[in-house]
Image (cartoon, rainbow, N blue to C red):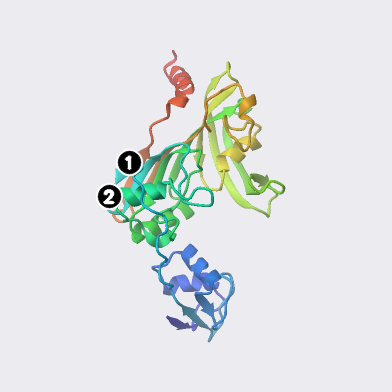
Amino acid sequence: MEITVTDHIGERLDVFVTRHAPDLSRSRIQSLIKSGDIQLNHAKAKPKQPVGSGDVVTIQIPDPKPIEAQPQDIPVDVLYEDDELIVLNKAEGMVVHPAAGNEDGTIVNALLHHCRGKLSGIGGHERPGIVHRLDKDTSGCLVVAKSDIAHRSLVEQFSTRTTDKVYLAVTQGTPSKPEGRVFTNIGRHPVNRMKMAVVDPGSGKASITDYKVVATDHSTDSSLVVCTLHTGRTHQIRVHMLHLGHPLIGDPIYAKPARQSAKTGRLMLHAWRLSIDHPVTGERLDFEAPIPKAYDRWIKLWNDEVTGA
């Protein structure tokens, strides 16, 4: 496809292409620009480069790469499924998609078998259907797109923050304020590139977490905290709770689990509730992943506080 620019002069290239190729998501367009499959005046450009009057924009969609991840008969806990999407209760310790060091045994491998290969191809050969992710050690609600229509809709919902995401976390110690909002920028740690960190304004990405302490176990100096995410940055809750001085129990990256009084054998972070709009019907869908047994101590304390027991 070749487009001669006659209007929207000065608009960013990626925004301009979005107007003429509505079937492509913004992130997909940016990826195609970076790979040189979308060009400006027959030359590679940058997504934010402005278009001028008379410029020629060329769009060439490459043939999809064959899916390299192989189907594997791995059990998955399905919370909901239809022709457009599937929602899972992801197990703690399971990687979402293949990557170096985790080439198989992932959610993608399991879903290629479960869905008989019917997953959105937009995510590419390693991440078909994946619109968001949970860390390996995090359990709970994970939605995966089975159709390209669903993929585009879900990516848009996550990027425009119309989803609702509520997590259960257990922190070392208790935040000084029983509830509040953490609003910082998060970026790559300046020294340890395996970590994320709160960084100076002007760098990283804006990150917002609301939290509420709902139960405290004084015997292990730990607290159950309900976290509501308004953004979806890598390790966001883990970094924000550390920023408050209270890393998560069992966190192998941001804490020292061997020195923590509470011993659970896992990272205490669970994607408890997720709400999305159905990509075809528009119906609001609410999902809740069963709370793992590792949380029993704190859930009992929470229930006791609610009932006054």
Q: Is residue 243 left or right of residue 216?
A: right
Q: Residue at x 33, y 58 (%)?
A: 147
Q: Is residue 130 above or below residue 221?
A: below
Q: Nearer the viewer, mark 2 or mark 1?
A: 1
Q: Which mark is residue 281?
A: none
Q: Is residue 265 left or right of residue 67?
A: right
Q: Nearer the viewer, residue 238 or 98?
A: 98
What amino acid is at disc 1? Val
Q: Residue at x 60, y 50 (%)?
A: 206
Q: Residue at x 50, y 75 (%)?
A: 38
Q: Nearer the viewer, residue 201 or 138?
A: 138
Q: How many marks?
A: 2
Q: Which residue is mark 2?
A: 82
Query: Local crowd at mark 1 within 10 Å, few (<14), some, or many (≥20)?
Result: some
Query: Local crowd at mark 2 within 10 Å, few (<14), some, or many (≥20)?
Result: few
What amino acid is at disc 2? Asp
Q: Is residue 133 above or below residue 65?
A: above
Distance in Å between CA atoms under marks 2 and 1: 11 Å
Q: Is residue 285 above or below residue 16?
A: above
Q: Position of residue 207 (x, y in %)?
A: 58, 47
Residue situated furthest bottom in the rendering: 54
**Quadrant the C terminus occupies:** top left
Q: Position of residue 42 (x, y in %)?
A: 54, 83
Q: Which residue is mark 1?
A: 78
**Quadrant the N terminus occupies:** bottom left
Q: Is disc 1 placed on a helix, strand or loop? A: strand
